[in-house]
Structure formats: C-alpha cells, structure tokens
Amino acid sequence: MHTFVFGTGKNGELKLITEDFNPISPGLSSYKEDPSIAGESLLPLLEKSKQIVPAHLHSSTPVFLRATAGLRMLGDELSERILDDAREILRESGFRFDSEKWVALSEPIFSLHDETRSPEP
C-alpha cells in the first residue's frame, strides 16, 4: 500500500511531503483457494495508513486498489470473487472508497516530481 501525504508549496502548488510504501506478500492472487479471506490481507496495510493519515481526514482520503498480472491470470470468475472480498474491506475501512472507480491507474497522468509539467485539465 502506498500512503501519500500532500501539502501546499509557497505558491499554493501541491507538494508531496511523504510517501510510505508497504507491499503485501503474497499478493491477492494467493487466495485462489479461499477468496473469502483475501480482503483480510489488506487490514494491516489499512491500519498502517490510519497511523499516517490524521483520523479527521480518513473519510475524505481516497483508497484505491491496484491489481497485478497475478490476479488477472486467475480468470474472471475467481479474480472477481477475490476482488469482491477486497472491495468489502475497503468499503468498511473508514477511508473514502468509490466502488465505481476503485482500481487506480498503473501509470500516473503526470509526475509530482516533474515541475515542468502540470496535470491535465
């Protein structure tokens, strides 16, 4: 899980202050034998993020899930069962979770570290 903390620079621009990365291993695809417990693997990551993000901001902080090739290789039915369990955990996490837009893009639209580019309108 990536947890980002943003602030504003002296000119009001968005600035990345800190980034915390905690991968899970094994990944969600390892729950192919029991998809109903896949979401539980996200709980320690969500708890870590709750320690970083101030409590009063949890409900306004979006959470996204990025699936990797391992999960896609399981096939539609099995991967959907795993993802359903993950969605339920994310809905109950206290963070903002939009089940219609829950998978993050793999490639950013722009780099926060590239000061010569600005986000697309």
Image: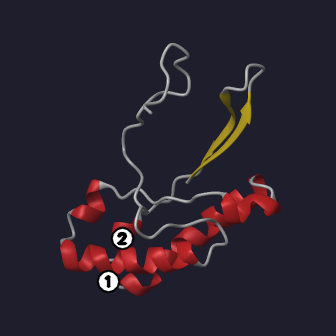
Q: Of 112 and 13, which appears nearest the observer? A: 13
Which picture quadrant has residue 47? Answer: bottom right
Identity, as a three-letter code, of the amino acid under mark 1: Glu
Q: Secondary structure at mark 2?
A: helix
Question: Could you say where residue 121 lies in the image, as x and y percent from the top left?
Answer: 44, 33
In this rendering, position of residue 111 left or right of residue 54 = left
Q: Which residue is at 20% across, 63% downward?
A: 73
User: Which residue lies most toward the front here?
Assistant: 121
Few, some or many residues within 10 Å of mark 1 (<14, 14–19, 20+): few
Q: Of 117 and 94, which appears nearest the observer? A: 117
Q: Which residue is at 45% across, 60% downward?
A: 65
Few, some or many residues within 10 Å of mark 2 (<14, 14–19, 20+): some
Question: Could you say where residue 117 lies in the image, as x and y percent from the top left?
Answer: 48, 18
**In the picture, which quadrant includes the N terminus?**
bottom right
In this rendering, position of residue 118 left or right of residue 77 = right
Q: Which residue is at 48% across, 29% downward?
A: 119
- In space, the residues marked 1 and 2 are separated at their CA atoms by 8 Å
Q: Which residue matches tag 1?
A: 33
Identity, as a three-letter code, of the amino acid under mark 2: Ser
The colour scheme used here is secondary structure
Question: Could you say where residue 13 lies in the image, as x and y percent from the top left?
Answer: 67, 26
Number of the label disc, if any, that sits on residue 30 = 2
In this rendering, position of residue 75 left or right of residue 39 = left
